[in-house]
Amino acid sequence: MATPTGWRREGNLPAELTSFVGRTRLLANLKRHLSESRLVTVTGIGGVGKSRTVLRLAHQVRSHYPDGVWFADLARLQDAGMVKHTIASALGIADQSSRAESESLSEWVGERDMLLIIDTCEHLVQGCAELVHELLEAAPNLKVLATSRQSLHLPYEHVVPVPPLQVPGDDPAESLFTNESVQLFAARAGASVPDFVLDEDNIGPVAELCRRLDGIPLAIELAAVRLRALSVEQILGLLADRFSLLAGASRTALPRHQTLRAAIGWSHELCEPAERLLWARLSVFAGDFELDAARFVCSDGRLPSEDITDLVTGLVEKSILLIRSNHAGVRYKLIDTLAEYGEEWLDKLGQKEQMSQRHLEYYLSLAQRSEEAWSGPRQIYWFVRMRQEHDNVRVALEHALKSPGKSALALTLLSSLWFMWVCCGFAREGRLYLERALAANPAVSKERCKALWVLSYVKSAQGDSAGALAAAETCSTEAVRVGDSRAVILASKMQGTAALLQGDLQKASALLGVAIEFNTENRELNPGLLPAIVELSIVLTTQGELYEAESLLLDCLQVCKERGELWVSSHAQWALASTRLATGRTEDALQNAKEALRIKRHFHDTLGTLMALETAARIFALSGRLTLAAQLLGALQQNWKTAGLPQLGAPWMTDEHNMCVRDCRMRLGELAYKDAFEEGARLDLDEASALALDDPDALDES
């Protein structure tokens, strides 16, 4: 076996023909794994930039390998029997003997200290795996870096997935101009249209374009090429059919990379028939989803439920599904581009309506389970879970509202999720959906009654007490007509809440008292019993009946503790702070207000956090911490603007707020008050909470 005259000891690494953008953390991660493992396989969907990333890495580490970095491209190879020959040719091996090719390769690599890159293995996985195993067994100083849409399934292999680029919005603190998707578009746009400049005029549309393209480098590069004939805004407008739009890459590119459709079609062809069917069916999900959801929605006689786990694993290994693990568990995601491709196949198969109905059934069942469990020890789990399922809930709602004969299911789904609209920061969205669903279901029914009291609750959370009262009164009238006693009781509670916000304390006391009396024997704590107790304690505190108010709240907190309920307990702590402040126990009141804020950090309870901060500002003012109080008042004024009506329009809360402002302004002096107030106005809600909690670490983190 001879070494040819043109053999180069440093290897045959191709030049980098384009600038490399982003991926700093990924490259560092790859370097670390390459230093620790002899085989690293870089996986990812078509067009995500596996080959380009590996080429950049290879140029960065080439000096670490005395015998060179060698690059073998298998993309155009169709015959698995030619894998060994193709790699031997890439290495420049001249072997004229009749020995097996793998034997020649192993001997040639021998003791060489080198890195072998095998690019695009997915269509030849078995042959690549066998050869890599032989070479690594025979050559102790060899390292292999492979790219593939699925792993080689070797026991010592370290797999590193390449995700899409970060898109604008992934990191809220990041400037649009420094986002890596935007930077890639700008770099390729500048190469395609030399006078293209990223500036304040076009950064918005460019950022939106990168978001819509899911951060897929190939898609972004193909879109940049379109600037030769179209503006960014025109490209955005045409993206409804992204596959036909994003064509026309370099003539030298592989056919599978010349259009986005071809790149994804290449991945589609690598899948087994059952995997392709599951891919199509999974397109019904929005955002990410859990394995149980896939099992329920996508299984039938052709795809048995017990097969779904293995098929999902296969789609993860082929880089079709992204996998996300966190403290809440494992979730899977089809990025929009792959979901759109799958949806096309689902349409061709005629299964879209069937899958959408199964999707609606699953999320309706999930909503009902979450409602039943909301007042128990897993409340935070259900808060996190249903926020994760927000996109899928929307899709299910839209399907129910737009499908003939299914709008009543939208009422059930919406009203089961009352806690999501009231407690989790989605009041505006909940109101819009509830009003749509009620308009679509004008006939009196128990489902409509429940939706009406939920709507009343949501409107109260927005400070719309008149609207809340009207919805609750309608609920009461209709509930009597259909004989729904539970809805009558809850309508009374919601009327009491509205009366409290309007400052009609006598009416509020009577209605809330009725709700409490009729709910006392009921095992259901929310939303009838415990919130009514907290609200009645506010009435009593405002009327000066402080002992009775405190006694009610302590009983409420005890029930919350026994049942593991946190959300109402945070409101009870806030109300207790006001009650104790009224009795002059400032330090106890402060501890209650802080405990309310600490609990609320587990929820996205914008309204509750603002109310707790209102009380905290009063406590700080009364205890002489005037600058801190003024800062919180500034934060409150700014953050109420996005939350709804300041102080919910409640006269008793507004009066307390105005008194606090006057007190701070008088005692601090106008100039010092203004400085502190403006400093606080720059804080978001998390930062204001950290300030009130005297938690500088949380303030720094936020």
Image (tube, rainbow, N blue to C red):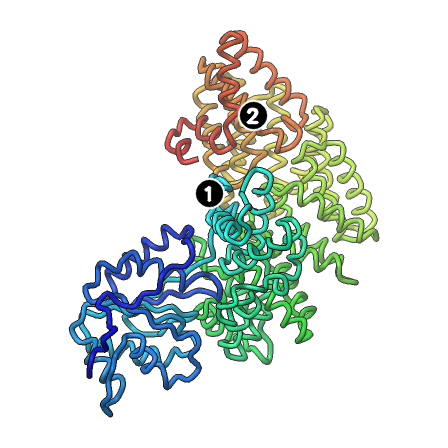
Mark 1 Cα shell of 10 Å, populated few (<14), some (14-19), many (≥20) = few
- Count of numbered labels shown in the rendering: 2
Q: CA distance from mark 1 to mark 2?
A: 31 Å
Q: Which residue is mark 1?
A: 178
Q: Position of residue 664 (x, y in %)?
A: 52, 12
Judged from this view, the residue extending furthest toward the bottom is 98
Q: Which residue is mark 2?
A: 636
Return the residue nearer the eye: 465 or 356: 356
Tell me the kind of residue under disc 2: Leu
666 left or right, relative to 491: left
Q: Position of residue 399 (x, y in %)?
A: 70, 60
Residue placed at 55% from the left, 70% from the top? 262
* Mark closest to the chain's N terminus, 1 or 2: 1
Q: Is residue 246 above or below residue 6?
A: above
Q: Is residue 564 above or below residue 271?
A: above
Residue 423 visible to an observer of this rendering: no
Tell me the kind of residue under disc 1: Thr
Residue 441 visible to an observer of this rendering: yes
Mark 1: secondary structure? helix
Mark 2: secondary structure? helix
Q: Position of residue 244 (x, y in %)?
A: 63, 65
Return the residue nearer the eye: 460 or 69: 69
